[in-house]
């Protein structure tokens, strides 16, 4: 049988009763992981309920018609597969959308991405579709659809920049008790579709605005109950509960469901960060990171630092005090305090931001966090969530601090808030001479547009790998 090479929009009849849809790519250092999934759609192009979404956390449809078969890895190659028994698809199901999502980057970073349609009985390849991508983090690779009682396959190739959750949302996947829109001080999550006008026939254009996205299928293990959670305002408590579930899904996805950690937050307060504070971006980041700390460490507290020319430790963030903590401590340099004749009276708990300054001196706060961890040992490792808009120039000093920290029970996850220069932080993954890789880094143009599940996946993808490596090296 001749394998048909397909182009975007082309279709062919499918005579095999059972087919496998295999996503294949070239694996390697720096290449995001890929997850295959499927959506069972009615003639209206929507799911009937959350059970019509088959993916890594819900591996088989109730009808047994669609099954996620999982990944296989070989040297330089990886696959993830969904199997469809066309005989078992219910009459209401007119289409099966065959999807993919990237974990830890975009599809433009994935070489050799191809979708293969395979006759599961004969073990022969029917067709293949080579996909070209850019900034997408989710894809509809193809679809199986019913036409006059027969099944056909179409190569779709529609990309989304809103991740798997954003894609699923467009087809009707929902979460019970979803949180209401956040207050004005906390910007809503907005998806960034790649090319809405170019959506494939029969598929919705990626929506330009998506509320905090859902996690289809309830996880088997409930999020940890956190001290102080009951004291939060209702809206904030609902957002926290949903986000803790999403953190739990990300941890389980990376094989770290039972991991605990002390979480430390570091916030850049240099002069260039002022717009991120005034627009509420940093306040939103802190609230989203509180869910990470709440899920990883159930004491309801998170240590925090701010820095610019000098570091300053902020009061511990206790979950029940989150609204007041955001109001009092999410601040940047207060140059207006230098105006003649006026002096602002600070709350006794607040840091005088004039003393923090406006320059970038990351190495100083890294050293201070290292000292804190060394002087306050804990049974669990420490995860440092470090947010900055770049402008890194103390490369040698930063590298020295982080190299020395390799032997300490700390993992440093840096998040860049924009397109600025991040210096050595961007290159740390490839720097030789370290027993383990103790640094993660990624940058986003606008963190407010990154859905929670995608953000948590990117934050937590390397942490479990470091725990394994650090344990083997005797660091933990």
Image (spheres, rainbow, N blue to C red):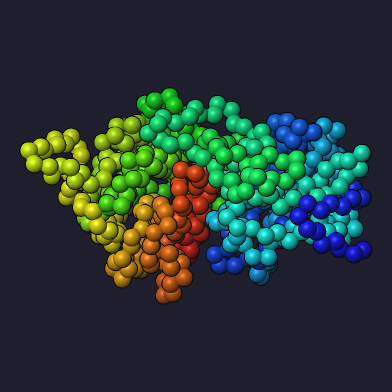
Q: Nearer the viewer, residue 300 or 44?
A: 44
* Horizontal and vertical percent position of residue 404: 33, 68
Q: Residue at x 17, y 50 (%)?
A: 355
Q: Nearer the viewer, residue 122 or 148?
A: 148
Q: How many marks?
A: 0
Q: Nearer the viewer, residue 10 or 315?
A: 10
* Horizontal and vertical percent position of residue 474: 42, 65
Q: Residue furthest top?
A: 234
Q: Residue furthest bottom?
A: 433
Question: Quick check: 232 above or below 336?
Answer: above
* Horizontal and vertical percent position of residue 379: 37, 51
Question: Quick check: 3 above or below 255?
Answer: below
Q: With 456 as the anchor, is 121 left or right in this view?
A: right
Q: Quadrant of the N terminus?
A: bottom right
Q: Is residue 296 visible?
A: yes
Q: Residue at x 55, y 56 (%)?
A: 105
Q: With 438 as the anchor, is 266 left or right in this view?
A: left
Q: Quadrant of residue 183?
A: top left
Q: Residue furthest left?
A: 341
Q: With 154 as the anchor, is 336 left or right in this view?
A: left
Q: Residue at x 51, y 40 (%)?
A: 190
Q: Quadrant of the C terminus?
A: bottom left
* Horizontal and vertical percent position of residue 86: 86, 43
Q: Residue at x 70, y 31 (%)?
A: 49
Q: Residue furthest front?
A: 197
Question: Quick check: 227 above or below 424?
Answer: above
Q: With 313 as the anchor, is 43 left or right in this view?
A: right
Q: Is residue 69 visible?
A: no
């Amino acid at each position: 049988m001749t394998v048909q090479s397909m182009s975007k929009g082309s279709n062919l009849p499918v005579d095999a009763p059972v087919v496998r849809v295999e996503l294949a790519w070239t694996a390697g250092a720096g290449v995001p992981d890929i997850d295959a999934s499927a959506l069972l759609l009615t003639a209206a192009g929507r799911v009937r309920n959350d059970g019509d979404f088959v993916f890594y956390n819900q591996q088989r449809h109730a009808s047994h018609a669609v099954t996620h078969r999982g990944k296989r890895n070989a040297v330089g190659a990886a696959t993830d597969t969904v199997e469809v028994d066309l005989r078992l698809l219910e009459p209401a199901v007119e289409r099966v959308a065959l999807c993919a999502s990237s974990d830890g980057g975009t599809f433009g970073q994935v070489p050799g991405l191809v979708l293969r349609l395979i006759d599961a009985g004969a073990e022969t390849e029917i067709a293949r579709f080579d996909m070209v991508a850019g900034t997408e983090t989710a894809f509809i690779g193809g679809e199986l659809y019913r036409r006059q009682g027969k099944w056909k396959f179409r190569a779709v190739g529609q990309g989304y920049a809103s991740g798997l959750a954003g894609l699923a949302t467009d087809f009707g996947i929902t979460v019970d008790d979803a949180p209401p829109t956040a207050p004005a001080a906390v910007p809503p999550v907005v998806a960034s579709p790649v090319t809405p006008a170019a959506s494939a026939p029969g598929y919705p254009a990626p929506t330009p605005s998506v509320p905090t996205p859902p996690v289809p299928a309830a996880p088997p293990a409930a999020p940890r109950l956190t001290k102080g959670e009951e004291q939060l305002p209702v809206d904030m408590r609902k957002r926290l509960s949903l986000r803790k579930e999403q953190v739990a899904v990300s941890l389980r996805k990376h094989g770290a469901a039972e991991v605990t950690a002390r979480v430390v937050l570091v916030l850049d307060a240099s002069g260039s960060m002022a717009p991120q504070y005034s627009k509420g971006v940093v306040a939103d980041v802190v609230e989203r990171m509180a869910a990470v700390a709440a899920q990883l460490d159930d004491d309801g507290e998170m240590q925090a630092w701010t820095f610019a020319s000098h570091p300053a430790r902020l009061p511990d963030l206790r979950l029940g005090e989150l609204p007041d903590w955001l109001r009092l401590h999410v601040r940047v340099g207060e140059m207006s305090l230098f105006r003649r004749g006026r002096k602002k009276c600070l709350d006794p708990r607040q840091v005088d931001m004039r003393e923090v300054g406006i320059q970038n001196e990351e190495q100083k706060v890294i050293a201070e966090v290292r000292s804190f961890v060394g002087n306050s040992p804990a049974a669990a490792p420490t995860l440092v969530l470090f947010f900055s808009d770049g402008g890194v120039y103390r490369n040698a000093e930063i590298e020295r601090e982080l190299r020395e920290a390799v032997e300490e029970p700390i993992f440093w996850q840096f998040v860049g808030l924009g397109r600025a220069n991040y210096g050595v932080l961007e290159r740390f993954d490839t720097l030789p001479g370290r027993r383990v890789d103790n640094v993660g880094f990624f940058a986003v143009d606008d963190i407010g547009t990154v859905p929670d599940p995608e953000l948590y996946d990117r934050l937590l993808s390397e942490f479990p790998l470091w725990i394994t490596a650090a344990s083997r090296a005797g660091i933990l």
